[in-house]
Image: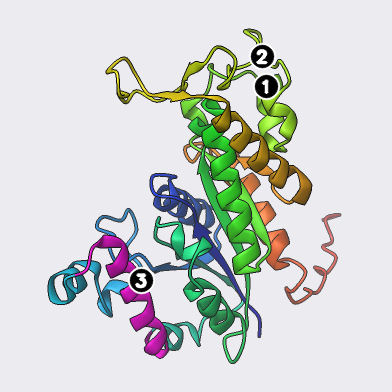
Amino acid sequence: MSKFGCMVMGPAGAGKSTFCSALIQHLRHCKRSCVYVNLDPAAEDFAYEPDVDIRDIISVDDVMEEEGLGPNGGLIYCFEHLMENVDLLTEPLEDVSEEYLIIFDMPGQIELYTHVPIVPQLVKTLTQGSLNIRMCAAYLLEATFVMDRAKFFAGTLSAMSAMLLVELPHVNILSKMDLVKGQVSRKELKHYIDPSIDLLDDEIGDDGPIKMPGDDGTVAVPGDAGEGRDGAGSVVEGPSFQRLNQAVAKLIDDFSMVSFLQLDAQNEESVDAVLSYIDDCVQFHEAREPTEPMDEIDVAG
């Protein structure tokens, strides 16, 4: 019997829990079943109560208090403890049937997906052995990153790093598309859906290119309302920053692994489109048992 799962990942604030809630709501609307697994030991509020919750095993607050660790160290400690007691996670999933999609809501600390091998170990546990879950990863990146090309390429690099480390079929998603509606044209947005180094060179959009460091010595970073060293706004300086972005963009372009879907979690059609890609990744429909055709119905009266 096959099991199917989706591991929802991405940096903090990308909208992972919001996407999980929208996905659960859409699955219920489509009369499909799902199991919601919370793997964020620091999570607080949920639109839907998790069916399996890491906080029933261990929480970041308890670890920080008892072990004297910070938030990031506490999170890694929680996952190490989870792997030492992984049966507490896997046993509730043993009886899940192929009718269900198992949704794993992950923490937002990207070092879990880029620096340490804990998540790959967890993936192997879930995809092998008695569970044998057909799994894909959904990596969310906030759409407002397209307002700052340097930030966008950094986020895209983190997505690619997660793809290489986790070794799962990946669906990369630009979330919160409603926040950039009216600010980025469709023509310009196409350049971000399939990221290319040309983004740093081409003049796209009606107002021309967003300036990069080196154009005039100093450049204000678009979309960042924070204050810089001079109090006038966030500022990056010098051609070295431009060379760094060129190197990151070239690395992404050379691998040519990352492309994005667009998500507005408030739009059911948008959620359905993302779900269709997830279903394709885990081969949900291909694995379903064929059904007998309906007997002919005599409608002649």
Question: Tags 3 and 1 in contact by the CB under 8 Å rule?
Answer: no
Q: Is residue 53 visible?
A: no
Q: Nearer the viewer, residue 288 or 211?
A: 211
What number is the disc on residue 205? 2
Left or right: residue 258 compared with residue 153: right
The residue drawn where x is 47% and y is 37% is 266
- Marks 3 and 1, how far apart at CA: 39 Å
**Location of the N terminus (image quadrant):** bottom right
| Residue identified by numbered label 3 | 76
The residue drawn where x is 55% and y is 22% is 213
- Marks 3 and 2, how far apart at CA: 42 Å
The residue drawn where x is 60% and y is 91% is 129
Location of residue 291 by image quarter:
bottom right
| Residue identified by numbered label 1 | 188
Residue 67: horizontal and vertical position, in percent?
18, 76
In the current view of this chain or complex, which residue is farthest to the left? 65
**Of circles 3 and 2, which is in front?**
3
Magenta extent: 69-88
Residue 77: horizontal and vertical position, in percent?
32, 75
Q: Residues within 10 Å of mark 2 (few under 14, many from 20)?
A: some
The secondary element bearing badge 3 is classed as helix
User: For the image shown, how many numbered marks are present on the structure?
Assistant: 3
**Of circles 3 and 1, which is in front?**
3
Q: Above or below — where is 71 with respect to 232?
A: below
The secondary element bearing badge 2 is classed as loop
